[in-house]
Image: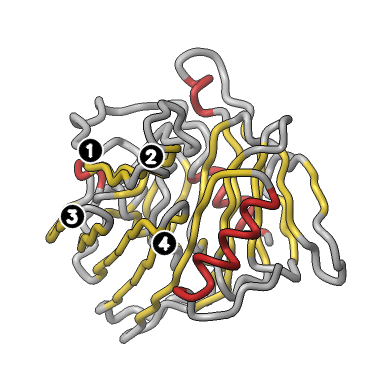
Amino acid sequence: MKFLTSALSLAFGISTLQAEPAPKEDWTYLDNGKIRIGVNRSAGATLGWLSLSQVDFNYFNRFDLGRYVQQSWYGDRDGSNWNGKPWRWNPVQGGNWQHKPAKVLKFEATKNRLNSTSIPLHWANGKSLEEVTFRQTIELYDQVVAVEFEMIYRGEHSHAPRHQELPAVFVDQSLKHLHCVKKGASDLISFIPGWPNEYVKVDRDWFAFLNDAGHGIGIWAPGTEALTCYRAQGGPAPYHKGACSYLAPIKTMAIQPGFTFRYQVFFTIGSISEIKHRFHKIAAPLADGPFRP
């Protein structure tokens, strides 16, 4: 967990230096009358909006290009530097910490489905990592959002095994109560994560971040056995907008020549009972693995 606590907290915590203004946002939305999602085409077509249909409250936090629901992978140290900190090979779908956007190669959207292909940037140095291709598909099914990510690596360097986020999810600061089933337990527990990262082994691969009223976002990442999480309190304006809750299903993987990895994640909005019902009835037939309530 040393890597997660030292790297992930720094990577997508509050940046104290913003080198250049963010590019003009270019949003595409899918809305089926029950749930609404949005992707920012000026940030690698990353997922940055989740709300109920016709409701102007975003459950995601997108304070910077590292906060979107997106692919982000970690490799070996490479001499790069992020805002004064030694960094490592780190392709990020949205772009880099200085607001430089990643390149979208292909983008298609229909009523309830969206596909994109992109080339990520190195989070620290902003270089386009042409040896990596990211693909994503997002579909709406009733009140469930289904996302499929794929990472294709064509590089020659063999990176050592690292914890990988599958994916990182940053949500609104009002959603502070994390619900999950810890390893060896049979029932959900609820707690407010601290700072920096906490590491949690889990017996169920779905989780929820809820507000004080018991309403919030459900996240199902089939096959997850562990997660990392934290709460960021933000700072003085304009960094108060960086306050958020965070979790990432994690898996240890080595990125080596020929590496390809595809995974799924599902989202819904509601209470615990509504989240469980929708994952069981709507998402489970779409998933690679069974849903365990």
Q: Position of residue 121 (x, y in %)?
A: 27, 54
**Residue 232 appearing in the image:** yes
Q: CA distance from mark 4 to mark 3?
A: 15 Å
**Mark toward the start of the polypeptide (2 vs 1):** 1
Question: Which residue is painted at 28% across and 46% down in the image?
Answer: 30
Which residue: 35% across, 49% down?
123
Around disc 1, counting alpha carbons within 10 Å, would you say few (fewer than 14), some (14 to 19), or many (20 or more)? some
Using the numbered discs, state the Cα–Cα distance from disc 3 to disc 2 in whole angstroms: 16 Å
Report x, y in % for residue 31.
31, 44
The quadrant holding residue 131 is bottom left
- Observer-side mark, 2 or 4, equals 4
* Nearer to us: label 3 or label 2: 3
Q: Element under label 4?
A: strand
**Distance CA(mark 2)–CA(mark 1):** 9 Å
Quarter assignment of residue 176: top right
x 49%, y 80%: residue: 288
Residue bearing mark 2: 49
Residue bearing mark 3: 109
**Badges 2 and 1: C-beta atoms under 8 Å apart?**
yes
Question: Which residue is tagged 1?
Answer: 27
Check disc 4 and give the amino acid type: Ala
Q: Residue type at mark 2: give it.
A: Trp
Looking at the picture, does residue 121 appear above or below residue 289?
A: above
Residue flagged by tag 1: what amino acid is it? Trp
Counting from the top left corner in percent of width and height, residue 122 is at 31, 54
